[in-house]
Amino acid sequence: MKAAQISGYSKDFKMNVNDIPVPEINDDEVLVEVKVAAVNPLENLIGTGSVKLIQDYSFPLTMGNELTGVIERVGRHVNEFKVGDPIYTRLPIEKIGAFAEYVAVKSSAIAKLPKNLGLVTGAAAPLTGLTAYQGLHEELKAKPEETVFIPGGSGSFGQMAVPIAKDMGLNVIVSGNAQARERTLAIGADRYLDYQTENYWEILQNIDYVIDTLGPDEFDREISIIKKGGRLLSLRTGPNKRFAIDRNLPWLKRQLFGVAGAKFDKKAAEKDVEYHFIFVRSSGSQLQKLTKIIEDNDIVPAVDPTEFGIDDINEALALVTTGHPKGKVVIKF
């Protein structure tokens, strides 16, 4: 089968499409014929070695983190899925490989495809959906009637995070470009700020939670609008000691992440705010809950119209990295 692989970490890595054997499955796994795989900024972080302290890989490494596909074979201990089921998944962090014609994956990491999504749109849902779900439920522990602000939340993350937050009974404020205002309000946002004409840090105050999608340059402004005892969750700024402890990482990694995140922890502590960082993990049970939210709210993630196959994988990643995709970039098999 064809698989897009890297042979090592590199600042300017390229994926090579190699012919490798179809994987064997364990008793708790299923073999999935991959139909569509999504391409994410996470691929860049993995390929450059930026996340090797969180997860280090062996080489050659088949890349790719989320996909839709059809079950081709089931392990002896798998009862909840059958051959022919269409599924979607964010693959387990320790065993990625969506950029391949087939993948072996634990049944505990997959869920049946939502009824309102096709194989293309479904591939755009699991990574951002699980990030939003885990961020709101586990990291922020958000409660009904509290307020969450998502700066830069008009893109693919916001498409999933807004309905999930509303499903939890939260008040949701989003900032983004003017073109996304109506679509973001239509999926449930209570308030929308146009970042080109409105500075959120001059308008908002006493916010319970902020979910950062923009990175470290925005940290001080985000902290400034959070009330005492509130929480800031970042998808991009970087891990800290809390992240390492929560994930049971070894002592050395706790120290390293403690040093790396010290500046942000100190700034947060000065404002009596908790700083959290998230690196999303796979979870079939959470995907099932996400499926209900997707179906009930008829959420259909935007997908960039550019057509890519596995042989175009480097061009697809370049569009994610340096272009301006109109939704999630995907490759089709």
Image: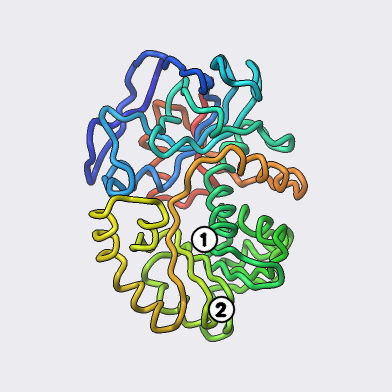
Tell me: 38 left or right of 60: right
Location of the N terminus by quadrant is: top left
Q: Amino acid at mark 1?
A: Glu
Q: How many marks?
A: 2
Q: Position of residue 80 (x, y in %)?
A: 66, 25
Q: Position of residue 157 (x, y in %)?
A: 55, 54
Between 142 and 165, the one nearer to me in the picture: 142
Name the residue at 37% across, 68% down: 216
Between 299 and 195, the one nearer to me in the picture: 299
Between 87 and 156, the one nearer to me in the picture: 87
Q: Which residue is mark 2?
A: 197
Q: Helix, strand or loop at disc 1?
A: helix
Q: What is the crowding at mark 2: few (fewer than 14 residues within 10 Å), some, or many (at least 20)? A: few
Q: Which residue is mark 1?
A: 139
Q: Earlier in the sequence, mark 1 or mark 2?
A: 1
Q: Position of residue 63 (x, y in %)?
A: 37, 33
Extreme-right residue of the structure:
296
Asked if residue 312 is positioned above or below residue 273 in the image, the reply reads: above
What distance separates the C-alpha of mark 1 from that of mark 2?
Answer: 31 Å
The numbered dot on residue 221 is none
Name the residue at 46% across, 17% down: 25
Badges 1 and 2: C-beta atoms under 8 Å apart? no
Name the residue at 37% across, 71% down: 217
Q: Helix, strand or loop at disc 2?
A: loop
